[in-house]
Image (cartoon, helix red, strand yellow):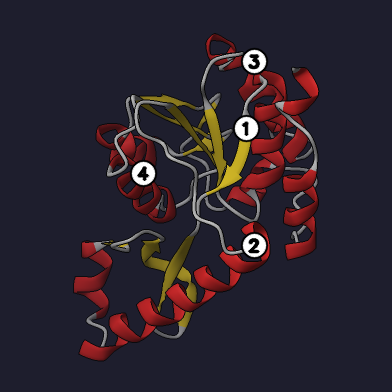
Amino acid sequence: MYFANREQAGRELAAMLAQYRNTDAIVLALPRGGVPVGYEVATALGATLDVVLVRKIGAPGQPELAIGAVADGAKPELVLNESIVRVLEPDPGYLEMEKARALAEIERRRRIYRGGRELPALANRTVILVDDGLATGMTALAALRSLRRQRPRRLVLAVPVASPDTINLLRPEADEIICPKVTEALFAVGEAYSDFRQLSDDDVIEFLQRPTKAARQ
């Protein structure tokens, strides 16, 4: 275990992102687990905190095995783990059905997390995408590709822990990757934390309502 909890992990990340303090950076967290991490980063940097809405697509009969992910947007970004898809050969309608289900959940979360509003404009800004760790990297991949379409000046991925293979998968998608703990021995993100409690929608809303940038102006 590398971190006591997500808050400690966020503070370690923030120290490695000090160059973005008091700039135009916006911190976008992947809910739910990335939000406490993102809050610590945003607070330390004096940045705005928001969420980017992405949903994993699980394998048939194995919902925890990510075979892809879909990210919110005017044109939703679908990414697939082609090697797993080739092995499992899901029924032709399975992916479309799961994509539709994921988009329905994304819409629900937009309504309750943001009151239905869209993300602020990201063009020509520094965007820092934060999660609590990367396993397969599918949700981060979908998020990065969706965010890139909005033409940020710089797109940074910041996560406390990940495997080398996942970092290598995502390296072409981001201008910079910050990850203090890169380890081969990562089978699940929760292994890196002493406290890895599951978060609720109410937890996410509470973090999003806390002051970050406003408190530092």
Q: Residues within 10 Å of mark 2 (few under 14, many from 20)?
A: few
Q: Which mark is residue 125?
A: none
Location of residue 8 by image quarter = top right
Q: Residues within 10 Å of mark 3 (few under 14, many from 20)?
A: few
Q: Quadrant of the C terminus?
A: top right
The residue that label 4 is drawn on is: 147
The alpha-carbon separation of the residues under discs 3 and 2 comes to 31 Å
| Circle 2: residue type | Gly
Is residue 61 visible to us here?
yes
In screen coordinates, is 88 left or right of 33? left
The residue that label 3 is drawn on is: 15
Q: Secondary structure at mark 3?
A: helix
The alpha-carbon separation of the residues under discs 1 and 2 comes to 17 Å
Give the residue at x 74% y 30%.
212
The x, y position of residue 166, in whole percent, is 37, 42
- Mark closest to the chain's N terminus, 2 or 4: 2
The residue that label 2 is drawn on is: 115
- Mark closest to the chain's N terminus, 1 or 2: 1
Q: Nearer the viewer, mark 3 or mark 1?
A: 1
| Closer to the camera in the image, 4 or 198 | 198
The x, y position of residue 178, in whole percent, is 48, 24
Q: Secondary structure at mark 2?
A: loop
The residue that label 1 is drawn on is: 48
